[in-house]
Image (cartoon, rainbow, N blue to C red):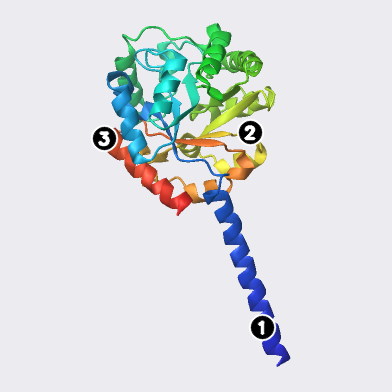
Amino acid sequence: MMQRRKFIQSGAMGLTGLLLARTTNAAFFAGKKMPNVGLQLYTLGDMMTTDPQGTLEKLAAIGYKELESAGSQKGNFYGYKPKELSAMIKAAGMTWRSAHVGGAPFNMSQIMKMAKTAEDSARIQKYLDKMKDQPKSLNLKENYQELADAAAEGGIGYLVCSSIPVNTLDEIKSAVEVFNKSGEACKKVGVQFAYHNHTSEFDEIEGHRPFDYILANTEKDMVKMELDLAWATKAKQDPVALFKMHPGRFPLWHVKDLDKTTMSPAEVGTGIVDFKTIFDNAKTSGMKYYFVEQDGAPKPIQNVTNSYNYLDKLLHA
């Protein structure tokens, strides 16, 4: 009788533990702590310059609520003033959370050094061909205060450096200087500055990895990171390990997948990135918002619909 009672008690305790674990997980994923699925508008190619209102309406119909803007052929804000773009996004039932802007002008050699594969080179060349006639956009090295003010004008919480040369130690040190100035400028106007990585940040340069050097030489509250989960994975980095090394430093994520064969960007949930494990560690990272991204998406609306459905099922079912 005693053994049976102990078995029942033990089983009850195990069941309680399991339920508690599920409840805790559900509270984090399904409750207010887990933001809605967001989108990086770069995924859509030219759609935000050719039909911005119609594009925003399509995204809202899919279910997207949070947006991050990118540079375009019409400049940083698709040809609009920040207040105008913010109002347009709000009218479509979404919120503009973050804006990508350039860190510093790249020359051709610096750009091509970012390519790790033939597919990378082809994608970069396609982007360069598309952008060659684009008017010069503001960049953080030359216009950090102006861009911080624009972010504040648009009412967005984050200004993100989309990329900056980090191929030499001098370039890495220059990036740190740009980030510190940008972080200070953003703080003055109530905006958080962050940096978005590619794969090159994890290559050793003159005895230093740019990723480590940048985080070690910037203030953790002044310069945050937007971790691109796919590029980190492609660079053979474990996102969860990065979260544990720098807890709270990653308020933004790019949720991007990689094709198993080509290692090119793919619809979320179809490739090699372990999103379940990564999202299980969202609290450690300090994540506030996450944005679906698929560079060179062949069928943008269908692609972002499929990615949205995967994440919505994974996180909110």
Under circle 2, the secondary element is loop
Under circle 1, the secondary element is helix
Q: Which amino acid type is marked by label 2? A: Arg
Q: Where is residue 108 shown, x and y percent of the image?
A: 40, 12
Q: Which residue is mark 1?
A: 7
* Residue 133 drawn above or below residue 7: above
Quadrant position of residue 193: top right
Q: Which amino acid type is marked by label 3? A: Lys
Regarding residue 2, the answer to whether it shows in the image is: yes
Which of the numbered marks, if any, corresponds to residue 155? none
Q: CA distance from mark 1 to mark 2?
A: 45 Å
Which of the numbered marks, if any, corresponds to residue 299? 3
| Residue at screen point 48% across, 41% down | 36
Under circle 3, the secondary element is loop
Q: CA distance from mark 3 to mark 1?
A: 56 Å
Q: CA distance from mark 2 to mark 3?
A: 33 Å
Which of the two residues, 237 or 297, is positioned nearer the viewer here? 297
Q: Which residue is mark 2?
A: 249
Q: Are marks 1 and 2 in contact (CB under 8 Å)?
A: no
Quadrant position of residue 73: top left
Which of the two residues, 136 or 231, is positioned nearer the viewer here? 136
Residue 7 lies left or right of residue 263; in this view the side is right
Quadrant position of residue 217: top right
| Residue at screen point 66% across, 23% down | 222
Mark nearer the N terminus (2 vs 3): 2
Q: Residues within 10 Å of mark 1 (few under 14, many from 20)?
A: few
Q: Where is residue 265 shown, x and y percent of the image?
A: 37, 36
Which of the two residues, 145 or 229, is positioned nearer the viewer here? 145
Q: Residues within 10 Å of mark 3 (few under 14, many from 20)?
A: few
Mark nearer the N terminus (3 vs 1): 1
**The N terminus appears in which quarter of the rendering?**
bottom right
